[in-house]
Amino acid sequence: MKTGLIILVLAGCFMALPACTEKDEIKATADSNAISLSAVVPNGSRSAATTTATINDFIVYAFTENSMLMDGVKVTRQGGSWTYSPPAYWPVNPVNFYAYSPEIDLSTDITGEGGGHIPGYLNNYNVDLLYAVRKDIAQQAAPVSLNFRHALSKVSMMLSSTNPRLKVVVSYISLKNVYREGSFNFPQASTLASTPDVVGSWTNLKSLSDMITFSIISNEDRVELTPLPTDYTLNNLDYSYVIPQPLTDVQLSDAGYSGTYIEVDCEIFDSATGAKLWPNSKTPNYMLVAQTETGRIVYPASSDLVKAYLPGHAYIYNIQINNPDVLDMIEFDVTMDDYTIDQM
């Protein structure tokens, strides 16, 4: 696997971790001439992502000679096998399979002629959307193995502070200006472990919104940063999945910030005296959060190496807040290690 490394001095620290495919498969028991299925899912960058061990069901479409054989059939894990009803039986001609997981409340446009797509997918930020394609499968006794891939990008923010002189208290974290809606297009070839370049694509991106990863209800819910990098969305909002999309540069104007960027709302105190250090009377207005006592750190989501979020990639931003003196302009060391999922 190739990895890239970049160091910037701006705001935040990025890196991405590799993931590999689980070797275990959950297989359906073949029944006479009935079509049986099995599923393999690549590991995600963190435990929250769906894996072969945690996938519970998927929806499958099957076509032979452009005639529909399975029309959105739900296949469910039962113990160590996959079951569905009514059973579909092997025809004389080869079969094309298209599958996705989990079940979604959307109309799909999947046909035997053009593959298909999922139009108007509205991302909820907490669902790991998977897809799989198997083409030209002739009758076989073994289950049809569906090798699933992640359709979305996974974005996480890890915050820490290693300066013992500072107490950093965070109340809000958000990824700003990302597209929430789009149409997913299945690839035109099989998503085999041996064909990692066969991936789906996204079009018709719209509905710019914010992925809030951490937010408080009251001041008692604020978190104090520690030397251990922590993803504060876990057990808070649990948001980390983003539709793959290009990232735009951050611009500051009289109207405020534009582009794709991360916001961290926080306060910084002297750990020994408890005196508030930032924000203070010298902090510019654009770094203040209206009607609160907090300041706002803003920095780009992109870098020289990452200009877009790609499907099946994970991006982890490691943000350290450590500046001991010049607190009206907080600086960060930024590193990023991009990754793509390896199929094992």
Image (tube, rainbow, N blue to C red):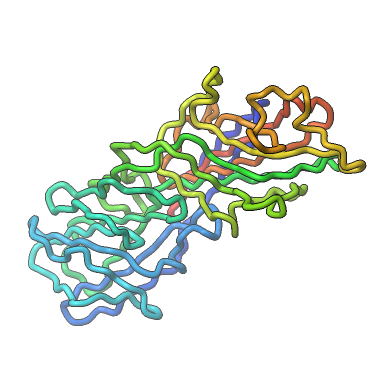
From the viewer's perspective, tell me whether residue 214 is left or right of residue 57: right
Residue 93 sits above or below residue 223 on the image: below
Q: Nearer the viewer, residue 258 or 56?
A: 258
Q: Residue furthest front?
A: 291
**Horizontal arrangement in the rendering, residue 98 relative to residue 280 (left or right):** left
**Number of dots carrying numbers:** 0
Residue in the foreground of this view, choosing between 94 and 277: 277
**Near-viewer residue (28 or 315):** 315
What residue do we see at 74% from left, 47% from top?
225
Residue 148 location, x and y as percent? 36, 57
Q: Position of residue 297 (x, y in %)?
A: 65, 32
Whole-percent x, y for residue 44 in the image: 49, 55
Q: Is residue 272 left or right of residue 147?
A: right
Residue sitting at x 23%, y 46%:
188
Q: Residue at x 55, y 54 (%)?
A: 237
Residue 320 can be seen, yes or no = no
* Quadrant of the frame with the C terminus: bottom left
- Residue at image location 21% in from the left, 55% down from the top: 135
The quarter of the displayed image where residue 87 is located: bottom left
Q: Residue furthest right?
A: 273
Question: Which residue ends up furthest to the top in the rendered image?
Answer: 254
For the question of whether residue 64 can be seen, the reply is yes
Which quarter of the figure has residue 31?
bottom left
Q: Nearer the viewer, residue 311 or 24?
A: 311
Q: Is residue 330 above or below residue 110?
A: above
